Image (cartoon, rainbow, N blue to C red):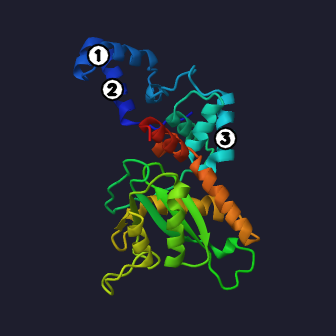
Amino acid sequence: MTHSITEEMRFRQRLCEYAKKYGVTKAARKYQTNRQFTYRQLSRYDGTVQSLALRSRRPHNSPKAHTEKELDLIKRMLKRNGIYGYAEVYVRCRNRGYTRSFGSMCRQIRKNGYRRPRIRRKSYARYERLDGKYPGDKVQIDLKYIPNECIKFPRYGYRYYQITAIDEYSRKRVLSVVKEKSTYETVKFLHVLEGRMGFKIKTIQVDNGTEFVNDHEQTERESPFEKAVREQGMKLWRTRPYSPWQNGKVERSHREDGKILYGRRVFTSEKELKEQVAKHEKRYNSTAKTSLAFKSPNQVVTEYFSHSGV
């Protein structure tokens, strides 16, 4: 194996030549090192600079290394559940006897090339993370356009949308498929939201879409959705215009919907579409999240109310 000649190798060669000529003690003093180091280099030095090349510090054996059985388990769980995130993969591995840390599992995935690394673009926008303090403290609501590519049944001019509500504290989600983007559908969704969430809601956060609110620069009248929020005793919080990151949790969940559901399936009927969205909602709420300390949204809600005695 050939080694490129580095400055460190040249330094060690000069050290050895000086030690052979004037002695180890004087060489150690001149080159500001110790005699033990000098003796080690002399024992390796054969007159060529290549003999002083830096050697690998990798241990000959590693008793704590992952076993083939553990690596096979990680690979199988990643193949089955990797689409739902590494947290779900880790929980599945733990349920099957894996005892190592989450970081150790991620390191093995990168090291063995089980998944190609994703290049993340750096964001220069300021972001202040705001989480609810308890289930129902703050719920984000937004609409997602369902791509036509996955709809393989007659639409008769309709465009399908997914209404999403996500609780900031527990990340629990409620989904609904509708045929139009209007306050009529969002008000209907709001009326059943608390029942489907399973707890009272204090604050609703939405963007400035006309399916939620009116433009206050054009009219002072409340939209039907704003009126419904007030009648149900909730507070309405509007995000700043052109600031989707303020609704970041629901926007991120929409990206996951596209990757997990709409990017992988086609639907041959409206009934199948609604059934698969309901199934996806159930799976999402029972999937472990790293932000929830490897618990699922349903677990977080259950534990909170069992500990608080509500």
Q: Residue at x 58, y 25 (%)?
A: 65
Q: Is residue 80 left or right of residue 281?
A: right
Location of residue 250 with respect to 303 vertically, above or below: below
Foreground of the two, 254 or 40: 254
First-in-chain label (1 vs 3)? 1
> Where does residue 70 sit, x and y in percent of width and height?
65, 30
Q: Position of residue 248 (x, y in %)?
A: 43, 61
Q: Secondary structure at mark 1?
A: loop
Choose mark 1 or mark 3, whichever is in front: 3
Q: Looking at the picture, does residue 173 appear above or below residue 305? A: below
Amino acid type, callout 2: Arg
Marks 1 and 3, how far apart in space?
51 Å
Residue under label 3: 77
> Label 2 neighbourhood size at 10 Å, few (<14), some (14-19), many (20+)?
some
Residue 14, numbered label: 2
Please report the residue visible at 33 percent of the width from the left and 58 percent of the height from the top: 127
Q: Can you identify the residue that label 1 sits on?
A: 34
Q: Secondary structure at mark 2?
A: helix
- Mark 3: which amino acid? Met
Question: In which quadrant is the N terminus drawn?
Answer: top right
Packing grade of label 3 (10 A; few <14, some 14-19, many >=20) is: some
> Is residue 294 placed above or below 211 in the rendered structure?
above
Q: Is there any visible trace of residue 65 in the rendered image?
A: yes
